[in-house]
Amino acid sequence: MQTGAKHVVFYLDTVSSFDFLEKTGLNVLLENRDIRKDRFQKWSEFAPILKEHSFCMCLDLAHALSANHDTLSEFLKNPEKIRQVHTSFLKDLKHTPIHLAGKAIIDEVKRIKVY
């Protein structure tokens, strides 16, 4: 079966071997986690892995903003590694559609240029 999908998204904390994952030949995107997890929320946790492997990022806006606004800024300083953006926000730690967000969240999405 063929789809139009160009990438496959993984959470870092579910990957046991990055070398194996790279050898699969998949177009891998690694997604940042939110404050419900104790790791993989910050750019500094992704940078060494992205440098060593050919993976890129799926930036989850809600996850980044759940940590703090500086977390989002750190990811956005590395736009060449971002291939996909998830636009939602967390309300009571649950994903909520972006169109129900307030203006501040919409403004954060507008900061991200997607081509």
Image: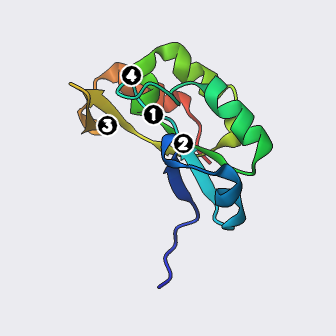
Residue 98, numbered label = 3
Residue 33, numbered label = 1
Q: Position of 18 compared to 53: left or right? A: left
Q: Is mark 3 on a helix, strand or loop?
A: helix
Closest to the observer, 42 or 18: 18
Residue kind at label 2, given as amino acid type:
Leu
Residue 12, numbered label = 2
Residue carrying label 4:
66
In front: label 2 or label 1: 2
Q: Is mark 4 on a helix, strand or loop?
A: helix
Residue 81 at x, y percent in the picture: 69, 41
Residue kind at label 4, given as amino acid type:
Ser
Which residue sits at x=70%, y=39%? 49
In front: label 4 or label 3: 4
Quarter assignment of residue 88: top left
- Asked if 82 appears above or below 63 in the picture, the reply is below
Residue kind at label 1, given as amino acid type:
Arg
In front: label 3 or label 1: 1
Neighbor class of circle 1 (other Cα within 10 Å; few <14, some 14-19, many 20+) is: many
Outermost residue toward the left in this view: 92
Please say if the residues under marks 2 and 1 sit with CB atoms less than 8 Å apart: yes
Residue 109 at x, y percent in the picture: 46, 31
